[in-house]
Image (cartoon, rainbow, N blue to C red):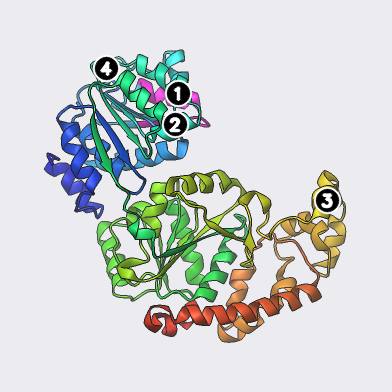
């Protein structure tokens, strides 16, 4: 395809050996200097299709901005930047910068003054820098409009046009879009020179056999919810994806302390250590692998029955890459994404990207309608609660002292604020649910439950009766799940190991 050996070696180090169809078709055309309009769905590897030829042609001796990538969202801009930084590791003097809203403008200005050959940004912030005179696009040779349909759908047409006018007309323009509505076609006709059309279908076969669920929870309750689901589902092998290396390492430490058979995989580990961890996982010498997206990209293991998105993926492409680790070779898989209220928009973007609505459940496994209906993962509010409005919240604050005295004795929903302030206040209310586990796991369940999940205190009698019945049901479901895949999970010991 014309990619240099230096870049091929870098790709191999990150577990990428074979190009995807969109990469095989796009890279040679881009290297030839042609404009490209590529209709590629998420999950096709389109990011590397434009990054590889761009980085290969950057002149490290010049500090001017030579390539500009415009993305609709901060999350996508950061993901592209992360991929670019991996590729330029072997290139001295090549620098990349992400510019987006919500970040300190002064800091971005200082970095731009230091010279950046590759800039990746969102339309609003790029236009802000152009108007301030802190960025010059007069030397840009390649312009990329990524996810153009989403960019125009979000109302950025005016900003995109103004940015394009600041770039020399003899540039190379690459437009990538999952769909080709009329406004995207018009944009291409106005600003591109006889572009080559490339149309690649999404490799959606990787998710056909995967049951996809969104579990609505809170950041505080996320770890306990993960433990609960591991114990219920008893996965043969599972990957738990975290957003950052630090979060992956911390979560793995917590899981090990609670007796789970886990290990971590991320970029802070040496190459030899990463290879050791992956080899152990391939040989089924561990059950749970806590990993970041980049580290797990080259991992291909048929025994993975579950994928847990501990942090919501940045976009639909990352989502498909993650959940595609399960459901291999015709087997059924389960992908569970933990979403807090602030993740609502990210989940909706993923749904638009994959073209389907994801099933939503709360922390107790109950089906819910919409992410916006659940603030704490316990289902929709009742009519009485909705009508009470802010008055109900004030009442919650007013009963805080009573909730402290009650400690789970029935403070009810009004004590929600107290439950947040008192991390251990829910231990009494949840003891009935964990009694059986304490016997089987040497009391380790307290480590999972005592993490201060901020759940509202309910009356002990109603909670015990309702949840014991629920546990009886879920026990039957768990038993059924454990037989999946030819009885693979029958010997996993409920997800925990003996120590």
Q: Which residue is mark 3?
A: 397
Residue that badge 1 annotates: 157
Residues at marks 1 and 3, CA–CA distance in whole angstroms: 46 Å
Earlier in the chain: of badge 3 and badge 4, it is: 4
Task: Answer above or below: position of 50 versus 288.
Answer: above
Q: Nearer the viewer, mark 2 or mark 3?
A: 2
Q: Is residue 423 magenta?
A: no
Left or right: residue 219 compared with residue 454: left
SS under mark 4: loop
Locate residue 292, reporting x and y percent: 39, 55
| Residue 392, numbered label | none
For residue 88, side relative to residue 236 (left or right): left
- Residue at image position (63%, 55%) is 369
Label 2: state its secondary structure. helix
Mark 2 / mark 3, whichever is N-terminal: 2
User: In the rendered image, is residue 154 in sight?
Assistant: yes
How dense is the environment of label 4, judged by Cα within 10 Å: few (below 14), some, or many (20 and up)? some
Q: Pointer 2: residues within 10 angstroms few (<14), some, or many (20+)?
A: many
Helix, strand or loop at label 3? It is: helix
**Dot 3, crowdedness within 10 Å: few (<14), some or many (≥20)?**
some
Of the residues tagged 3 and 4, which is closer to the observer?
Answer: 4
Query: What is the number of the mark on residue 151?
Result: 2
Label annotation for residue 139: 4
> Residue at the front extreme?
182
Measuring from the top left, give residue 113's x and y in whole percent. Answer: 36, 20
Q: CA distance from mark 3 to mark 4?
A: 58 Å
Q: Nearer the viewer, residue 303 or 440?
A: 303
Q: Is residue 4 left or right of residue 149?
A: left
Asked if marks 1 and 3 touch (Cβ < 8 Å), the reply is: no
Label 2–label 1 contact, CB within 8 A: yes
């Amino acid at each position: 395809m014309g990619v240099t050996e230096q870049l091929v070696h870098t790709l191999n180090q990150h577990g990428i050996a074979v190009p995807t169809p969109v990469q095989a078709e796009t890279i040679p055309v881009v290297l030839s200097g042609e404009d490209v309009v590529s209709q590629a769905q998420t999950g096709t590897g389109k990011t590397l299709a434009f990054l590889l030829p761009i980085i290969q042609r950057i002149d490290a001796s010049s500090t001017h901005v030579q390539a500009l990538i415009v993305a609709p969202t901060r999350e996508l801009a950061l993901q592209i930047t992360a991929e670019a930084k991996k590729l330029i590791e072997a290139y001295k003097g090549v620098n990349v910068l992400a510019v987006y809203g919500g970040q300190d403008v002064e800091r971005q200005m200082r970095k731009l003054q230091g010279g950046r050959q590759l800039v990746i940004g969102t339309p609003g912030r790029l236009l802000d820098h152009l108007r301030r005179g802190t960025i010059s696009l007069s030397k840009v040779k390649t312009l990329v409009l990524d996810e153009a349909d989403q960019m125009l759908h979000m109302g950025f047409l005016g900003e995109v046009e103004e940015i394009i006018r600041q770039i020399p007309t003899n540039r190379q323009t690459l437009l990538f879009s999952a769909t080709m509505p009329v406004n995207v076609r018009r944009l291409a006709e106005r600003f591109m020179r006889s572009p080559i059309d490339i149309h690649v279908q999404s490799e959606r076969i990787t998710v056909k056999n995967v049951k996809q669920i969104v579990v609505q929870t809170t950041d505080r309750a996320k770890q306990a919810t993960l433990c609960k689901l591991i114990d219920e589902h008893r996965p043969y092998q599972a990957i738990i994806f975290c957003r950052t290396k630090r979060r992956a390492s911390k979560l793995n430490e917590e899981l090990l302390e609670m007796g789970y058979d886990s290990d971590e995989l991320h970029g802070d580990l040496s190459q030899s250590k990463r290879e050791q961890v992956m080899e152990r996982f391939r040989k089924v010498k561990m059950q749970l692998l806590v990993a970041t997206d980049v580290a797990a990209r080259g991992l291909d293991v048929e025994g993975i029955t579950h994928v847990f998105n501990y942090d919501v993926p940045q976009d639909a492409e990352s989502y498909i890459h993650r959940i595609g680790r399960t459901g291999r070779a015709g087997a059924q898989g389960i992908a569970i994404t933990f979403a807090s209220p602030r993740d609502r928009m990210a989940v909706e973007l993923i749904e638009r990207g994959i073209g389907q609505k994801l099933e939503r459940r709360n922390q107790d496994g109950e089906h819910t309608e919409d992410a916006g209906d659940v603030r704490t993962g316990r289902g929709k509010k009742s009519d009485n609660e909705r009508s009470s409005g802010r008055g109900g919240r004030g009442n919650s604050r007013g009963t805080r002292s009573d909730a402290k005295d009650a400690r789970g004795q029935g403070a009810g929903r009004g004590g929600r604020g107290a439950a947040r302030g008192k991390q251990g206040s829910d231990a009494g209310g949840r003891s009935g649910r964990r009694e059986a586990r304490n016997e089987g796991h040497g009391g380790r369940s307290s480590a999972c439950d005592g993490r201060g999940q901020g759940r509202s205190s309910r009356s002990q009698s109603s909670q015990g009766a309702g949840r014991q019945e629920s546990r009886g049901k879920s026990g039957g479901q768990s038993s059924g799940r454990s037989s999946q895949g030819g009885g693979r999970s029958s010997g996993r010991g409920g997800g925990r190991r003996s120590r």
